[in-house]
Image (tube, rainbow, N blue to C red):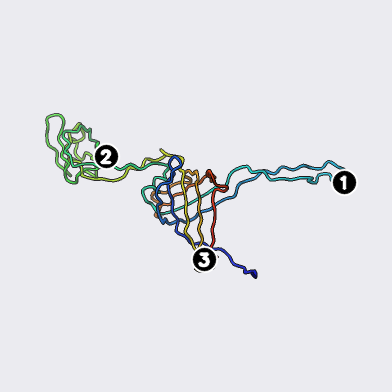
């Protein structure tokens, strides 16, 4: 076959799976990956240097010994539940709150700033306030004001110990607990195509990468949030390599 000079420009659908005790979970994706790189293992050079007069200082033998394993780095902006948890080095936990009345929660109001109530998600319009001493009812937007689950005194009489009643909102969602799971064992599959040879299939399989969150997570930058993981590739039992690239003719 004659030589054909072709480059490789990869576009691909990237899938990721959690690995728990060596068991691969379901693949999530395709996710939008802004960057994925594999860095070869670093090496340490060992040389035997000549002390002979005619070749002094030259290498008589030189070998490259493996030092650090191959590395994987990935950046993405698809924020599914698992990927957001990965981005903050944390876990995800589902929660549900039923609609429940709260009576006489003790709160000391201040005119200097907001005071949070014990419940984060409160049914709008359900807050009522009375003074702890004497039980005088206070008036919204005259004696106090409300923002979400926070209250602030407006009048002098409201800047005191109060009893607050409200209704917990019926909500469900997910709590992401940051920095609670540093190590992220992951499997990756790239189902790709070489754009330099339209239609040419490229498949990249990474059996296991031991990853950790990297970089700062910009919460309010005006841009889409981007997660980043980085770590070492691990060769699995029965395999001779940690990853492989398959390109069809």
Cα separation between marks 1 and 3: 55 Å
Label 1 sits on a secondary structure element that is loop
Residue 13 image point, x, y percent: 44, 59
Q: Is residue 160 left or right of residue 78?
A: left
Q: Is residue 99 left or right of residue 226?
A: left
Residue shown at 64% from the left, 69% from the top = 1
Q: Residues within 10 Å of mark 3 (few under 14, many from 20)?
A: some
Residue 160 image point, x, y percent: 20, 32
Residue behind mark 1: 54
Residue behind mark 3: 200
Label 3 sits on a secondary structure element that is strand
Cα separation between marks 2 and 1: 83 Å
Number of numbered discs visible in the structure rendering: 3
Cα separation between marks 3 and 2: 61 Å
Q: Which residue is situated farthest in the top direction here?
A: 133
Q: Residues within 10 Å of mark 2 (few under 14, many from 20)?
A: some
Mark seen at residue 114: 2
Q: Is residue 223 left or right of residue 205?
A: left
């Amino acid at each position: 076959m004659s030589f054909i000079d072709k480059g490789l420009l990869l576009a691909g659908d990237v899938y990721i799976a959690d690995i728990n005790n060596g068991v691969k979970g379901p693949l999530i994706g395709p996710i939008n990956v802004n960057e994925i790189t594999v860095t070869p293992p670093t090496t340490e050079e060992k040389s035997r240097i000549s002390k002979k007069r005619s070749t002094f200082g030259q290498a008589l033998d030189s070998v490259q010994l493996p030092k650090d394993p191959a590395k994987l780095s990935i950046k993405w902006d698809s924020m599914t539940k698992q990927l957001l948890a990965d981005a903050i080095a944390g876990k995800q936990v589902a929660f549900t709150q039923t609609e429940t009345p709260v009576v006489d929660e003790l709160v000391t109001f201040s005119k200097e700033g907001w005071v949070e109530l014990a419940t984060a998600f409160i049914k709008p319009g359900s807050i009522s306030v009375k003074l702890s001493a004497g039980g005088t009812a206070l008036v919204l937007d005259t004696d106090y004001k409300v923002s979400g689950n926070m209250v602030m005194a407006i009048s002098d009489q409201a800047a005191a110990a109060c009893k607050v009643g409200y209704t917990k909102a019926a909500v469900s969602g997910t709590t992401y607990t940051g920095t609670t799971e540093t190590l992220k064992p992951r499997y990756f599959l790239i189902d790709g195509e070489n754009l330099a040879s339209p239609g040419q299939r490229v498949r990249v399989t990474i059996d296991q990468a031991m990853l950790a969150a990297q970089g700062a997570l910009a919460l309010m930058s005006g841009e889409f949030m981007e997660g980043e993981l980085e770590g070492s590739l691990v060769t699995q039992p029965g395999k001779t390599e940690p990853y492989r690239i398959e390109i069809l003719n």
